[in-house]
Image: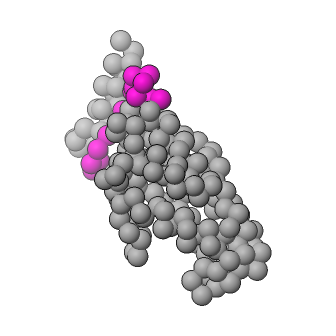
Amino acid sequence: MIRHALAAGLLALAAPGPARAVAIAETVVATTPPANRAEETLAAARAFYGFWDTGDEALLRQAIAPGFVDRTLPPGRPQGPEGPAAASRTFRAAVPDLRVRVEKMIVADSYVTVHMVFTGTFTGTFGGTKGTGQAIRFNATDLLKVADGRITDNWHIEDNLTLLGQMGVVKTDP
């Protein structure tokens, strides 16, 4: 009863009306998925972030669906499953000891929101800039959609300004 009232209240907040300040394209109300689906969703997310932590492309293939779509595809990155693999290879050439630590993971039905911190040492080359051993540390957040135990869609945002400033690619000091 309380759960239904809470869900109704949340849906009312997203409903159109005079008090609405912003249009909402989609509202996902957190529900507890069936145990088997929750475990499949978590397994896909764990494999995906295991890939980012290690560069092991077998984990990437385990995590994402063949029809995977990057919904925030950066220029020059291939769409589909090759996109994350190419991004990892490029970034690991610049930061060979790249690590990712998942700070928070929120599962809401078939969606997973993940906040993470990337760390490492810039000893390789990125673009035309050669690293001199600078420590890097930047945040990123993903929204994943999972179906049938595989990631089908990813919306992501990285703190690239912090990263590029630490690498010396852009000047961030006033």
The N terminus is located in which quarter?
top left
Which residue is at the front of the view, 19 or 161?
A: 161
Q: How many marks?
A: 0
Residue drawn at point x = 54 percent, y = 42 percent: 46
Measuring from the top left, give residue 132's x and y in whole percent: 76, 80
Kindly tell me whether residue 122 is visible in this rendering.
yes
Q: Residue furthest left?
A: 17
Residue drawn at point x = 40 percent, y = 37 percent: 149
Residue drawn at point x = 50 percent, y = 42 percent: 45
In the image, residue 78 sits, relative to residue 28, either above or below, namely below
Which residue is at the front of the view, 99 or 30?
A: 99
Which residue is at the front of the view, 33 or 85?
A: 85
- Color scheme of the displayed model: one colour
Residue drawn at point x = 38 percent, y = 66 percent: 73
Q: Residue furthest front?
A: 58
Q: Is residue 120 left or right of residue 56?
A: right
Magenta range is 23-39
In the image, residue 82 sits, relative to residue 112, either above or below, namely below
- Magenta stretch, main secondary structure class: loop
Kindly tell me whether residue 30 is visible in this rendering.
no
